[in-house]
Image: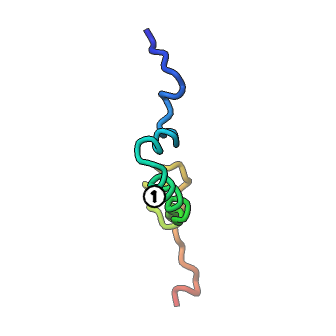
Amino acid sequence: MIAQLPARVLTPRPTIERLIQHYGAMPVLWATIRALLMPRRRRPRPPDTDHLGAHLRRDIGLPPTLPHAPKYYDLR
């Protein structure tokens, strides 16, 4: 048997009315204002794929890098 739950039970966030009823209007208002004024967290950039090792490149599905052959002017 599969349980049939109403949609309001499945929502993870509590409704604003329940928050106000539980904590009061002013704390909810101040928490909302503070959350709106805080800067958003930025995700760090992924690493550059040119500096990954051969095994890591293979694991994520990238082709292997060409072996570095020094140019004649680099050997001087």
**Residue 26 percent location from the top left of the image:** 47, 55
Number of callouts: 1
> For residue 2, what is the image quadrant?
top left
Compared with residue 26, is residue 39 higher up or lower down, i.e. above or below? Answer: below
Judging from the image, what secondary structure is the residue with disc 1 in?
helix
Using residue 40 as the reference point, say whether residue 24 is left or right of it: left
Compared with residue 41, is residue 28 higher up or lower down, i.e. above or below? Answer: above
**Residue 59 percent location from the top left of the image:** 46, 49
Name the residue: 51% across, 59% down.
35
Which residue was labeled with disc 1? 54
The residue positioned farthest toward the top in the image shown: 1
Name the residue: 58% across, 87% down.
73
**Residue 42 percent location from the top left of the image:** 52, 63
Quadrant where the image shows the N terminus = top left
Please tell me which residue lies in front, 71 or 22. 22
**Residue 18 percent location from the top left of the image:** 47, 39
The residue positioned farthest toward the bottom in the image shown: 76
Name the residue: 47% across, 62% down.
52
Q: Is residue 5 visible?
A: yes
Q: Specify the amino acid type for callout 1.
A: Ala
